[in-house]
Amino acid sequence: MRFRHHLFICENRRPEGSSRGSCAACGGEAVKQAFKSELLRRGLGGEIRANSAGCLDLCEQGPVVVVYPEGAWYVGVSAGDVAEIVTEHLVGGRPVERLLARVFPPPR
Ligand code: FES
């Protein structure tokens, strides 16, 4: 099966006090659950897949969500943003500009 969109939602958790923080510590798990619930509620589960991901290396900007096939990187996503991303981007084809990553870490 080929999904129309595939979402990778970081749920990585680092030990308490980590200098980089982690998506799980700032709501990544709730974001993934919100995507799963919203997609199910709208009957989109068969065409849009939301998966957990490990660290995507934008930890300081988490929670981080990447949407393919566009390769759109969302940062600072909260569960409250999920319905907007589904409506505007995944259904409407218009990425939610205010949540797109502006700063990526330098290549290593
Ligand atoms: S912990 Fe989520 S991007 Fe690194």
Image (spheres, rainbow, N blue to C red):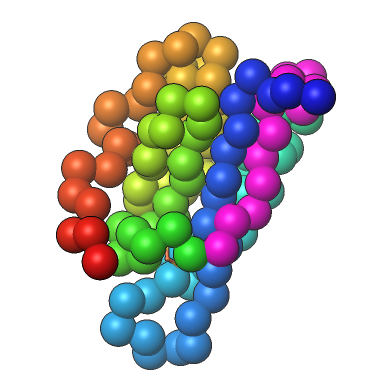
Residue 49 inside the magenta-drawn segment: yes
Q: In the image, residue 2 lies at what x, y percent?
A: 73, 23
Q: Please tell me whether residue 36 is drawn above or below residue 83 in the rendered image.
A: below
Write the start and end of the magenta stretch as one range: 41-54
Task: Ligand 1: give its quadrant.
Answer: bottom left
Count how many numbered circles sit on residues in the image. 0
The percent coordinates of residue 98 (x first, y second) are 26, 33
Asked if residue 73 is positioned above or below residue 86 in the image, the reply reads below
**Is 50 positioned to the left or the right of 84 in the image?**
right
Looking at the image, which is closer to me, 62 or 34? 62
In this rendering, does residue 94 appear at all?
yes
Q: Quadrant of the C terminus?
A: bottom left
> Which residue is outermost to the front?
108
Q: Nearer the viewer, residue 83 or 47?
A: 47
Residue 23 on image: x %, y %: 47, 64
Percent of width and height locating residue 29: 61, 59
Q: Nearer the viewer, residue 99 or 107?
A: 107
Residue found 67% across the figure and 46% down from its top: 51
Name the residue rendered at 23%, 52% in the picture.
Answer: 104
Q: Is residue 72 above or below residue 93?
A: below
Residue visible at 69% across and 34% down in the picture: 49
At 38% from the left and 40% from the top, the residue drawn is 73
Q: Quadrant of residue 56?
A: bottom left
Q: Is residue 7 left or right of residue 23?
A: right
